[in-house]
Image (cartoon, rainbow, N blue to C red):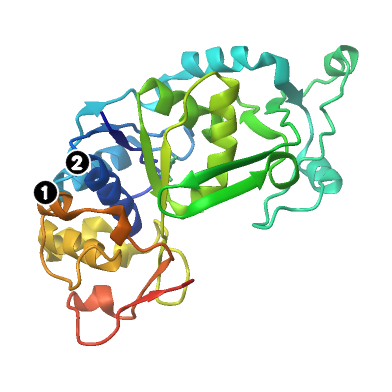
């Protein structure tokens, strides 16, 4: 049985990019008789709002993207994360570094600008730890290994844990579990067999696959979908009100939005109304574009597809 999932973060309203990921996850599972788990990723209490959760669920229902199981919200899963950390305790260590120390001691940055932790606190003795007063975050010591996998859409991908990622945070200093840990623990607990999400998370997949291994769990299949870009090349963000589902709903029926996404991602040849159900009937990963997709100027505002080219593959 295929089990896909929606994993929205309730830190803002849903935009066209979020809706696209949800549609592709849903159609992928439903086209093969699978199920969808909904899990609200409200790990970060400072950024999550119950009102956004309600709005996102309402948008999903409106689009016709239903779910079979609602998993526990991440804010209620602290015990499961603590248990996972306990299982990893041999390779987890407290880190007391301040922001400035991190900057000063960091190794060369990864290709995407991420700072690689230099391992400063990795070798602290128990006495040195006792002497610190600041609450530490917890990091996990990664081995010098390359993790390779085949993404269902993007193809083969590999990354060196130590050189391109470094010892990453698994629990923040305020006690909140980090995304990388929580997502692995929860996808495994929810029985998820395929993860469909934006390509911005492609470089996280090898890290998560390694965590699955450390926890003795089986990783799911991954499909990393192209990002939707605004006409000026920026990634859509939750601040782009023109691509906000809440606003589109006032002007268009759901089939028009589903049709737009299906057309942008290469599943249908023209922008025409289609329901989520109909799309599941014709869905195939072979047809989904791989490169990021730039929205043509005026496309959303016009709500029509005038003649001409309205999608550009940003990278292909
Ligand atoms: N909650 C994340 C987001 O909304 C998705 C994480 C994932 O799919 O692994 O961006």
Residue 104, visible in the rendered structure: yes
Q: Earlier in the sequence, mark 2 or mark 1?
A: 2
Give the residue at x 85% y 47%.
104
Percent x, y of residue 79: 48, 13
Element under disc 1: helix
Percent x, y of residue 5: 32, 36
In the image, farthest residue toward the bottom: 307
User: Badge 1: few (under 14), some or many (20 or more) residues near its Cα, within 10 Å?
Assistant: some
Frontmost residue, 268 versus 123: 268
Give the residue at x 53% y 42%.
149
Percent x, y of residue 256: 14, 64
Taking the image as shown, residue 150 lies to the left or right of residue 284, namely: right
Taking the image as shown, residue 287 lies to the left or right of residue 121, namely: left
**Which residue carries the number 2 mark?**
30
**Which residue carries the number 1 mark?**
277
Give the residue at x 83% y 41%.
101
Look at the numbered discs 2 and 1 and tell me whether their residues touch, using CB distance below 8 Å. yes
Element under disc 2: helix
Quarter occupied by residue 138: top right
Indicate the quadrant of ligand 1 in the picture: top left
Which quadrant is home to the N terminus? top left
Taking the image as shown, residue 132 lies to the left or right of residue 152, namely: right
CA distance for labels 2 and 1: 8 Å
156 lies above or below 166 = below
Percent x, y of residue 124: 87, 22
Give the residue at x 80% y 48%.
103
What is the total number of numbered labels drawn onto the structure image? 2
């Amino acid at each position: 049985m295929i089990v896909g999932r929606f994993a929205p973060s309730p830190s803002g309203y849903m935009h066209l990019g979020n809706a696209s990921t949800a549609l592709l996850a849903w159609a992928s599972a439903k086209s093969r008789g699978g199920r969808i788990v909904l899990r609200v990723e409200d790990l970060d209490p400072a950024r999550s709002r119950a009102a956004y959760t309600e709005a996102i669920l309402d948008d999903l229902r409106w689009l016709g993207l239903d779910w079979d199981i609602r998993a526990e919200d991440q804010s209620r899963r602290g015990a499961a994360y603590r248990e996972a950390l306990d299982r990893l305790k041999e390779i987890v260590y407290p880190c007391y570094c301040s922001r400035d120390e991190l900057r000063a001691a960091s190794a060369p940055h990864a290709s995407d600008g991420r700072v690689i932790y230099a391992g400063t606190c990795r070798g602290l003795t128990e006495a040195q730890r006792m002497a610190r007063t600041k609450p530490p975050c917890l990091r996990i010591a990664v081995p010098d290994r390359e993790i390779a996998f085949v993404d269902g859409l993007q193809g083969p991908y590999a990354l060196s844990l130590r050189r391109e990622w470094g010892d990453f945070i698994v629990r923040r200093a305020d006690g909140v579990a980090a995304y990388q840990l929580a997502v692995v623990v929860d996808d495994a607990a929810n029985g998820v067999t395929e993860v469909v999400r934006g390509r911005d998370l492609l470089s996280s997949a090898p890290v998560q696959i390694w965590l699955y291994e450390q926890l003795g769990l089986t990783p799911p299949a991954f499909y990393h979908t192209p990002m939707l870009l605004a006409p000026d090349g920026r990634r859509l963000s939750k601040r782009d009100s023109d691509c906000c589902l809440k606003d589109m709903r006032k002007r268009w029926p759901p089939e028009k939005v589903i049709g737009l996404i299906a057309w942008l991602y290469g599943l249908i040849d023209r922008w025409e109304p289609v329901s989520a159900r109909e799309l599941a009937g014709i869905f195939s990963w072979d047809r989904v574009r791989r490169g990021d997709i730039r929205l043509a100027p005026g496309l959303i505002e016009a709500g029509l597809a005038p003649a001409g080219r309205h999608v550009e593959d940003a990278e292909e």
